Image (cartoon, grey):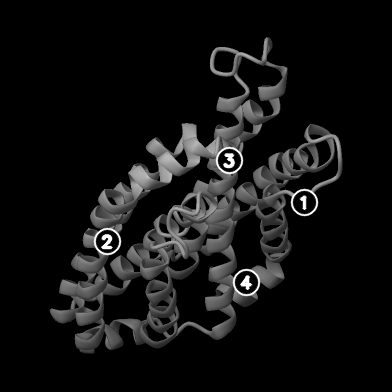
């Protein structure tokens, strides 16, 4: 955190109110959306025989738990801003990144099943996206290019985890003990291989997203970003190629391609120490 950030944190009344509001709203909505939509989503996916029907009962509540945790971190940041604590900015950055992560994916099964269109979790996502720019640019005095690059890193964080979820979904539906039409593990093998790799890549990008704003040693953050990019590329492109050209028998677009493409874009800026230092410095 820069000296300007420390000075700015001493007059954080507005961000304190915003942090407490986002925290309380995030916690309430995380509970409320589960009670209101989970059964409808799972029922609609089951009726439509979508692949997500096997994993949605696990992953949607998991993201709600992460959202509740993010809300509590936001409450802590809000109190810190109101009390003019220097650590409030650090906690706020962590809170907004985790909130954006937790409030994006649940909209996919909600809209895919047509149980809730548009996805209700966007009510959490978009206000936090706006506050992300306010927080890092106004409170943290970060340059616009760094804020946007942080958003690209955050997209890689989210999309790689989504690829991990999707791989888990497809793997589950292709296991012989679950699908009686399949008598071997070959159809599930590519998803078994890439599911953990994509999730590890996601975690590394999450560390990079937060670290680019908060870490003093940016080179260590760069190492995490490089590892995340290489993991995503090595797992994501084979997974997308298999999904688009082999599994269906005819060429078809696959959402699996988004994660490695965004990771490749981020990786181009990370692999060059000159560009990395120019953005992160």
Q: Is residue 17 left or right of residue 211?
A: left
At x 24%, y 68%, the residue is: 25
State the residue lying farthest toward the front: 47
Label 1, label 4: how far apart the Cα atoms are? 36 Å
Q: Position of residue 108 (x, y in %)?
A: 51, 54
Mark 2 = which residue? 29
Displayed quadrant of residue 150: bottom right
Point out which mark residue 166 bears.
3
Q: Position of residue 174 (x, y in %)?
A: 63, 23
Label 1, label 3: how far apart the Cα atoms are? 15 Å
Category of crowding for the residue at label 4, using alpha-carbon neighbours closer than 10 angstroms: few (below 14), some (14–19), many (at least 20): some
Q: Is residue 270 left or right of residue 251?
A: left
Q: Could you tell me which secondary element the residue under label 4 belongs to?
A: helix
At x 65%, y 28%, the residue is: 193
Mark 4 = which residue? 277
Label 2, label 1: how far apart the Cα atoms are? 33 Å
Q: Position of residue 55 (x, y in %)?
A: 46, 35
Where is 165 relative to 270, above or below? above
Label located before the other in sequence (2 or 4): 2
Displayed quadrant of residue 263: bottom right
Displayed quadrant of residue 245: top right
Label located before the other in sequence (1 or 4): 1
Label 2, label 4: how far apart the Cα atoms are? 39 Å
Where is 262 relative to 160, above or below? below
Give the position of the N terminus as an image quadrant. bottom left
Label located before the other in sequence (2 or 1): 2
Label located before the other in sequence (3 or 2): 2
Q: Position of residue 30 (x, y in %)?
A: 28, 56
The front one of 57 and 140 is: 57
At x 15%, y 73%, the residue is: 79
Point out which mark residue 253 bears.
1
Category of crowding for the residue at label 3, using alpha-carbon neighbours closer than 10 angstroms: few (below 14), some (14–19), many (at least 20): some
């Amino acid at each position: 955190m820069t000296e300007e950030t420390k000075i700015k944190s001493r007059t954080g009344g507005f961000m304190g109110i915003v942090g407490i509001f986002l925290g309380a709203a995030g916690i309430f909505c995380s509970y409320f959306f589960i009670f209101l939509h989970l059964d409808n989503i799972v029922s609609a996916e089951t009726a439509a025989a979508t692949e997500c029907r096997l994993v949605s009962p696990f992953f949607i509540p998991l993201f709600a738990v992460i959202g509740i945790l993010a809300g509590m971190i936001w409450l802590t940041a809000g109190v810190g801003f109101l009390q003019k604590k220097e650590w409030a900015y650090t906690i706020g950055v962590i809170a907004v990144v985790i909130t954006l992560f937790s409030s994006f994916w649940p909209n996919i099964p909600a809209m895919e099943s047509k149980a809730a269109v548009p996805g209700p979790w966007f009510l959490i996502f978009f206000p936090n996206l706006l506050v992300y720019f306010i927080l890092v640019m106004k409170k943290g005095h970060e340059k616009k290019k760094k804020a946007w690059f942080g958003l690209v890193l955050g997209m890689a964080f989210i999309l790689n985890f989504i690829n991990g979820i999707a791989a888990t979904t497809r793997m589950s539906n292709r296991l012989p003990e679950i699908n009686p039409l399949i008598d071997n593990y070959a159809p599930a093998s590519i998803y078994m291989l890439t599911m953990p790799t994509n999730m590890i890549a996601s975690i590394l990008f999450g560390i990079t997203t937060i670290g680019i704003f908060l870490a003093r040693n940016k080179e260590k953050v760069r190492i995490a970003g490089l590892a995340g990019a290489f993991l995503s590329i090595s797992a994501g492109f084979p997974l997308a190629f298999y999904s688009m050209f082999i599994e269906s028998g005819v060429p078809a677009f696959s959402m699996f391609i988004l994660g490695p493409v965004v990771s490749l874009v981020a990786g181009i800026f990370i692999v060059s120490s000159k560009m990395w230092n120019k953005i992160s410095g």
